Every structure is written in structure tokens, then in C-alpha cells.
């Protein structure tokens, strides 16, 4: 679906943000791109919808190079939800906001209306149909931004730091929503530094540090590896930290959630090690 | 010794349909490290703005009830007077820095007070040192990372040497490592300088180990108020949807399975220590 | 945007950069007055080349040339306009010069003005400038507004880029369509930018209040601008310059090229 082939990217200011990055994303995958702030995560995902073009190497979306197609046409396939919804919202009503992209893509008015209603429903925003987006709370504005991207049904959905500023409950709802999106067949890519969030949904993890990919694979394997964590300057999930502190007792270290942890501890105690 | 006391504090923003905070009564002792948390919209940000006088002086609206901070009745003192006793650090580091160099920003508050130049110089250097950013003095705020900017913001407030510092979700825009560093700085201010700290946070897994007092709000009211260990163990906390540290959750489930740890852990280091005792036994 | 390029500051130091902005401004003011006092082309040419040693000493030749190049558009427009004006109503232009010389003189005067201000901004950092404003009698509110605006220029520029990216990612094509459509295409960029600026102002106001804004009528300052020897030299030079200009205007008959050329 998306192929990144040995991509280098340097910003006009001279900052080398990507150094020889290669990555393949299959249709329907669920992927988390992780790393410290400044590691290159957002620079990488902006290559997927053509906002940035590689300085060296190339990026193929469905076999077509991002250099050969406009951002608007790529956007039809690759939806990008930006971190700050206030960088997108400008319409008089939520309805208009959601219809914006649909109009840009040339949807017929009849289809457009149906899509808007569907998106409002999906994100629980129907009551705000005729409300001004600026009147809504922070969390609600985030939902409007998300709805406005999902409305045109892109095959790939990229979410840039979706958990920032969210409380625990909002993150739970978001997590379930993302998992559901993926279950419906969409390719979902989240850019995040929230380790606990990733530990709970267990996607494929691509870990970046200083413009390069330092690890790519199973979430559990990567998040419980202390050397990798050091290299990428990330903080492992709290449960993992606990088990990493108990390795000398012979406990497993690839534990990231509470129920696994309980099982491991109970087994240890019953195994007559006390 | 009490440094903050409120009785039945209630406030509605102008044009608001219902109060953002209702009947808030609490006391905070001098030198405490308080964590204030709760779901979005619970009123914690509103409460912070009451502490330094932004409410009612900047935000108009009706403030009912009593509020005494550092010995002053907030309703009767302008913000610039409160600012010398209570500092407020906001969520977005970029929008708190308005000067062209870090030093000038840190000096801003003292310049406003009419402090003599030599004293400003001393305090600026001291504040930069306390927040670990001495080498950034002549840099422009825009060139700094989010974590560095937030440390500058803290230095700006610290330079005025307030008795109380309130932090409103200071790590929202930072990654976990950056957040940890900020919490360490805040903890230093509390333990070394005796500054009373009120920290509004969602990231309890990283912050709760520093706190001696936790207040949880929901829908404008205080729902839980007490020591961290009791609060995080309570069922109410879980129902409200507060992000209880995983270490505490582990403790709860182990307890249900018949394994009892000596104390309630809120951090991974504590959990490791407590588990060792049980596993070795 | 090359006119603006000439006005941007770079992190460089030189004897000119280090001069007190207040004195530099005095010099600029005198150059300004000089340019306005004369419409004789030979003198305007002298004024044009006069700052050259300063430019070279400060090492800002490239940016200075760029700002002049940017001003060329308006200067050529002025030339054409004055040329036509000179031919159509010759009784309104000074009898000492031909219409082409007059047109040249007017456009050169414009360039002289642009040039003096450009050099000022090229050799004065915004911090230095705001410090100078603070120490003069300008009310602090204005200085603060100026400094804050300059401080947030890069932030706004970045934000505008992010907003453009966000809307492009929703299918907005800025380059397409006729003139009207293209203007309308900028609405989804301007509105978020304006709204975000308003939000930012509110946050800034909160931060200012929380750090004691308005606490004392007598604000003090971390830094102090001190006049050094080089500054006194430049100040005296500027005053002598002004005196010379006034003397020449009043007592010296200044020739024009038209007068000098044989008829």
C-alpha cells in the first residue's frame, strides 16, 4: 500500500530529518510510529500524503510515486488528521466543516449530504450539526476534525499525536475507536509518544530516533527491550519498568499490561520459588 | 500552616449556563505538593485561575464563596499583587514567552515590579540555575525545544520568588522523557526551596510519586481529597475515569488474588521494592 | 518578498551593528531630511553612495542590494509616472532640470529613503531596537507590542505553513481556478490563522497578568544601553551632516546635470 524506499529528507533550513528510511505498510495494517519529539515521526508521515517529498529516494502509494501526483489527489486515498484541530476549523457550522473536503474532492451534493450525516453519527456529533465549530470544547473540536477526514472514506488514516491533552477516559474511547476503524479494514497509522496507549492496543511499532528507524515489529517485543528504549530515549510502560527491575529474580521481562503481570507473578509464587 | 483556604467557592464564566466550579472547599498546607486532577471540563483549570486572581479580576463573572491565598483575600487584591505570592505556569510553553531572549523573559516579572537592575540580574541567574538552563540565557525562545521552553516559563515565574506555584498541565505538549524532566524540576522547587506546588496533571503514572496530597474533581466539585495512596485505591477514582497509575492497578489486582503488598505503590520503583519483599519471602 | 528580505536581521556583529540604535536612528533621520531637501540629481546621487562605507563595514552588502532590487519595481513606476508628468505639465517641475532628469531624481530620492531605513534595520537586531525603544520616552505598551509582534513572526509563519498543509490534506488546491476562486481559497487559511492568533493573545494576556503586569508605574530594565565612544562619534557626524545639508541648501547653488550639459 505504502512503500518508503531509502528516503532522505532535509528541510530547507538545513535540518536533516530523515536519513535513509525504508518501510512497507500493507493494506489494513495498524501501525504506531513512535519516538521522542524531533525523531522524525511527523516528517515521515507527511511523506505518505505528499505534503513533503523526499530529497533522496522515493515514496510509493499504491504503486504511484508521490512525486508524480498532487497532494489533493493523494489525500483522497490518504487521510491525515493533524494534531491541532484549530489548524483546520474555519467553517460556520460543523456540517460545512465536514463537507469541505467532500466538495474539494468533487462529491455530488446528494452523496455529500449522506456522507456528512454518516460522519456526524460516527463521531457522536449529530446534535452539533448546525453549531459553529468554534463554540465546541477542545475534545469536541478534535472529533469534528476526525469526522471531516473520515467523511471521504480514505483507505489510509493517519493520526498525528491523537492523545495529546486528552484525559484517561477520552483516550479509552479513542483507543476503541481506532481499533474499530482498523477492524473495518482501514490502514491506520498513529504517530505518538504515548507508550501506555500503544501498550494497550498493541499495533505494529516502528520506533524512530534521530531520523532513522531503530526498531520495527511487535509492540510488546519493542517496548520491553531496554536497549532499544535507551537508544530511542523512550520510557517503557510502567508495568515493564517494574519487571525490568525484577529480572534478577528470574521473572519474564516481556510484560506490558496488568493482567499479564498478575499472571506472571502468580505463576512465580506458585512455582515454589518462595 | 495553611497557605490556601477556600470555602464554598463557586464561579460561573460570563455567559456560562452553569458554574464551572461549585462549592469548592479545600485547604492546602505550606510546602505541600498537591496534584489536582479529574476528567476534562471538571473545573481544575478554572480553580487554578482563582488562586492567582485571574478569576475574578481578569475574567469578570460571579465568584462566590471565600478564597484566601498566602494570607490575602483574592477578591480584594489586584492580580499584580497576587502575582508576587502565587505564580502560574500554563500549558502551552510558546504562548508564555514574549521577549526576544530567555533572560529578558525571565526578567519580565521583576521589571514589572520595579526591581533594581542588580537584583534583577541576580534573580535571573538564580532562576536559570534552579531550572537547569543557565546556558540558554541569550537564546531566542523560538529556537528552543518544548521542554526547554517550559523550563524557561518556570524560571520566569520562579524569579519572582512566589510562595506558591501552580502548574496547569505543563507537560501536555511534551514527550514522556521531557515530562519527567519537568516533574523533577518542579519537585526540586518543592523539596529544596519549600515552594508550595499545585500541579494539574493527567499523567499520574509519572507525577504521582512526588505528591503528598491529591485532589480529584468532577463536574465542578471536589470528589476526593486526601493522601495519594488512599485516593488511587478508591473505587470512585476508577469510576470517574482518572488514569490511575498501572503500579497501583497491579497492587489492586494482586490484592484480589490474595497477595498483599506492604503499601500502595504509585510508581514503578516503589512497586519493585514492595514486590521484592513478597517474592523473596 | 525581497523588499522584506532587506529589512530582516541576521545574527552578525560589526562596529555598525554595535552602535546604539538611537544614534543610528538619528543618522537615518538626517539622511531622510537630506534626501527630502534636495531634488538635484547630482546631490541625490552623492546621498545614494554615501552609506556605502557603512554597508561594507557592516558586511551586509548582499541583503542591502536585495532590498534595493525589491524597491526597483516601485522606483521604476515612479520614474515613468514622473516622466509623463514632467512632459505633460513642464511648468510644474523645476526649471533647472529636464523632465527625464526630474523623473530620475524623484525615483532616486525614493531609493535613497528606502536605502537609509534598510541599512538601519539590517544592522539593528530586534532586541537592540526594542531596548532602544524601552529607554526612550516611548510608552512601554507600544514597545511591548512591537517586541511581541517581532517575536511571534516566525511562529506565525510556521503556523501558516501548518494550516496550509492541513487544508491541502483535505483536498484544497491553492493554485487552481480563476482569480476570484484563488482569493476564496485563502479563506480556509486565514480564518484558522486569525482564530489562533486571537487565542494566542488571550493566553499571552493571562501570562502577562500572572507575572505582575501593571504592578509599578516605574518599570526597570535588565539591560541598559550605554553610549560609547563610537556612538558619540556617529552622533557628532550626524549633526555635522545635518548642518552641512542645511548650509548647502540655503547658500550653495546646486547644479543639475541639465545645467551642466552644453545646450
Image: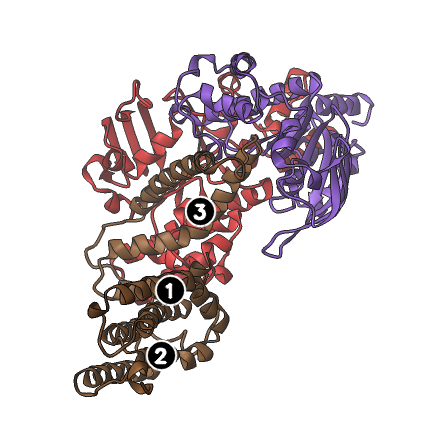
Residue A38's disc number: none
Relative horizontal placement of residue C139, taking residue B240 as reference (left or right): left
Disc with the residue nearer the chain's start (1 vs 2): 2
State yes or no: discs 1 and 2 in contact (Cβ < 8 Å).
Answer: no
| Nearer to the camera, B34 or C143 | C143
Q: CA distance from mark 1 to mark 2?
A: 15 Å
Chain the render paints purple:
A
When the figure is inspected, residue C131 is found, relative to residue A149, above or below; the finding is below
Q: Among all residues in the image, which is located at the extreme left?
A: C250
Q: Residue at x 26, y 75 (%)?
A: C39
Image coordinates of residue B266 in percent, x first then y, are: 57, 31
Residue C45's disc number: 2
Per the rendering, the colour in which chain B appears is: red
Q: Do marks 1 and 2 share a chain?
A: yes
Image coordinates of residue A208 in percent, x first then y, are: 70, 43
Q: Residue at x 51, y 44 (%)?
A: C161
Chain the render paints brown:
C
State yes or no: discs 2 and 3 in contact (Cβ < 8 Å).
Answer: no
Chain letter behind tag 3: C
Work out which quarter of the rendered image holds the N terminus of chain A and state it: top right
Disc with the residue nearer the chain's start (2 vs 3): 2
| Nearer to the camera, A57 or A203 | A57
| Nearer to the camera, B2 or B106 | B106
When the figure is inspected, residue B227 is found, relative to residue C65, above or below; the finding is above
Which residue is the site of mark 1?
Answer: C75
Chain letter behind tag 2: C
Residue B33 appears anywhere in the view: no
Amino acid at each position: 500500500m505504502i512503500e518508503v524506499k531509502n528516503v532522505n529528507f532535509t528541510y530547507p533550513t538545513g535540518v536533516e530529518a530523515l536519513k535513509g528510511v525504508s518501510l512497507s505498510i500493507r493494506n489494513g495494517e495498524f501501525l504506531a510510529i513512535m519516538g521522542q519529539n524531533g525523531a522524525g515521526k511527523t516528517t515521515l508521515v507527511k511523506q505518505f500524503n505528499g505534503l513533503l517529498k523526499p530529497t533522496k529516494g522515493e515514496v510509493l502509494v499504491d504503486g504511484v510515486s508521490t512525486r508524480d501526483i498532487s497532494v489533493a489527489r493523494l489525500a483522497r486515498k490518504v487521510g491525515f488528521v493533524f494534531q491541532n484541530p484549530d489548524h483546520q476549523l474555519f467553517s460556520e457550522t460543523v456540517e460545512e466543516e465536514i463537507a469541505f473536503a467532500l466538495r474539494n474532492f468533487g462529491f455530488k451534493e446528494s452523496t455529500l449530504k449522506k456522507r456528512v450525516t454518516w460522519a456526524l453519527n460516527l463521531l457522536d456529533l449529530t446534535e452539533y450539526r448546525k453549531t459553529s465549530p468554534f463554540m465546541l470544547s477542545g475534545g469536541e473540536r478534535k472529533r469534528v476534525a476526525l469526522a471531516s477526514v473520515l467523511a471521504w472514506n480514505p483507505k489510509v488514516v493517519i493520526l498525528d499525536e491523537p492523545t495529546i491533552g486528552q484525559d484517561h477516559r477520552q483516550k479509552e474511547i479513542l483507543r476503541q475507536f481506532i481499533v474499530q476503524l482498523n477492524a473495518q479494514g482501514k490502514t491506520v497509522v498513529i504517530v505518538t509518544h504515548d507508550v501506555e496507549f500503544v501498550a494497550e492496543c498493541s499495533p505494529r511499532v516502528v520506533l524512530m530516533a534521530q531520523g532513522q528507524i531503530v526498531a520495527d515489529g511487535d509492540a510488546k517485543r519493542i517496548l520491553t527491550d531496554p536497549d532499544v528504549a535507551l537508544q530511542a530515549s523512550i520510557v517503557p510502560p510502567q508495568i515493564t519498568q517494574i519487571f525490568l527491575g525484577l529480572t534478577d529474580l528470574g521473572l519474564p521481562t516481556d510484560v506490558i499490561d496488568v493482567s499479564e503481570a498478575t499472571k506472571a507473578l502468580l505463576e512465580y509464587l506458585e512455582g515454589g520459588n518462595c | 500552616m495553611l497557605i490556601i483556604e477556600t470555602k464554598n467557592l463557586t464561579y460561573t464564566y460570563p455567559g456560562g449556563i452553569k458554574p464551572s466550579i461549585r462549592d469548592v472547599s479545600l485547604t492546602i498546607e505550606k510546602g505541600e505538593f498537591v496534584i489536582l486532577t479529574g476528567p476534562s471540563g471538571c473545573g481544575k483549570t478554572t480553580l487554578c485561575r482563582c488562586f492567582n486572581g485571574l478569576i475574578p479580576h481578569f475574567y469578570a463573572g460571579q465568584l462566590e464563596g471565600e478564597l484566601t491565598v498566602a494570607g490575602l483575600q483574592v477578591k480584594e487584591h489586584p492580580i499584580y499583587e497576587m502575582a508576587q505570592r502565587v505564580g502560574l505556569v500554563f500549558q502551552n510553553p510558546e504562548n508564555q514567552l514574549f521577549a526576544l531572549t530567555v533572560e529578558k523573559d525571565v526578567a519580565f516579572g521583576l521589571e514589572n515590579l520595579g526591581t533594581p537592575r542588580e537584583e534583577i540580574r541576580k534573580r535571573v541567574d538564580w532562576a536559570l540555575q534552579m531550572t537547569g538552563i543557565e546556558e540558554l540565557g541569550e537564546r531566542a525562545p523560538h529556537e528552543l525545544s518544548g521542554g526547554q521552553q517550559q523550563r524557561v516559563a518556570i524560571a520566569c515565574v520562579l524569579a519572582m520568588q512566589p510562595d506558591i506555584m501552580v502548574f496547569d498541565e505543563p507537560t501536555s505538549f511534551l514527550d514522556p522523557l521531557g515530562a519527567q524532566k519537568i516533574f523533577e524540576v518542579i519537585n526540586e522547587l518543592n523539596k529544596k526551596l519549600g515552594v508550595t506546588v499545585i500541579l494539574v496533571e493527567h499523567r499520574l503514572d509519572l507525577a504521582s510519586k512526588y505528591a503528598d496530597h491529591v485532589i480529584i474533581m468532577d463536574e465542578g466539585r471536589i470528589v476526593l481529597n486526601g493522601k495519594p495512596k488512599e485516593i488511587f485505591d478508591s473505587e470512585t477514582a476508577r469510576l470517574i475515569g482518572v488514569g490511575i497509575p498501572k503500579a497501583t492497578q497491579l497492587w489492586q489486582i494482586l490484592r484480589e488474588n490474595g497477595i498483599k503488598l506492604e503499601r500502595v505503590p504509585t510508581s514503578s520503583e516503589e512497586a519493585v521494592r514492595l514486590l521484592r519483599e513478597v517474592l523473596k519471602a | 518578498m525581497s523588499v522584506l528580505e532587506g529589512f530582516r536581521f541576521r545574527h552578525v556583529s560589526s562596529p555598525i551593528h554595535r552602535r546604539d540604535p538611537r544614534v543610528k536612528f538619528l543618522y537615518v533621520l538626517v539622511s531622510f531630511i537630506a534626501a527630502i531637501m534636495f531634488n538635484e540629481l547630482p546631490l541625490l546621487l552623492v546621498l545614494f553612495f554615501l552609506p556605502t562605507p557603512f554597508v561594507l563595514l557592516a558586511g551586509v552588502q548582499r541583503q542591502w542590494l536585495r532590498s534595493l532590487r525589491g524597491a526597483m519595481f516601485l522606483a521604476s513606476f515612479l520614474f515613468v509616472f514622473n516622466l509623463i508628468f514632467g512632459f505633460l505639465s513642464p511648468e510644474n517641475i523645476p526649471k533647472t532640470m529636464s523632465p527625464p532628469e526630474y523623473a530620475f531624481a524623484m525615483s532616486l530620492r525614493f531609493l535613497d529613503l528606502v536605502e537609509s531605513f534598510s541599512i538601519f534595520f539590517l544592522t539593528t537586531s530586534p532586541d537592540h531596537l526594542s531596548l532602544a525603544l524601552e529607554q526612550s520616552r516611548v510608552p512601554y505598551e507600544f514597545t511591548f507590542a512591537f517586541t511581541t509582534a517581532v517575536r511571534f513572526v516566525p511562529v506565525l509563519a510556521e503556523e501558516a505553513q501548518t494550516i496550509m498543509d492541513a487544508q491541502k490534506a483535505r483536498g484544497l488546491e491553492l493554485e487552481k481556478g480563476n482569480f476570484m476562486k484563488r482569493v476564496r481559497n485563502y479563506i480556509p487559511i486565514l480564518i484558522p490563522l486569525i482564530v489562533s492568533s486571537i487565542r494566542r493573545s488571550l493566553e499571552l494576556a493571562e501570562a502577562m497578568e500572572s507575572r505582575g503586569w501593571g504592578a509599578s508605574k516605574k518599570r526597570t530594565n535588565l539591560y541598559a544601553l550605554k553610549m560609547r565612544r563610537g556612538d558619540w562619534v556617529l552622533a557628532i557626524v550626524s549633526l555635522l551632516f545635518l548642518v552641512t545639508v542645511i548650509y548647502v541648501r540655503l547658500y550653495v547653488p546646486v547644479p543639475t546635470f541639465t545645467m551642466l550639459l552644453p545646450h
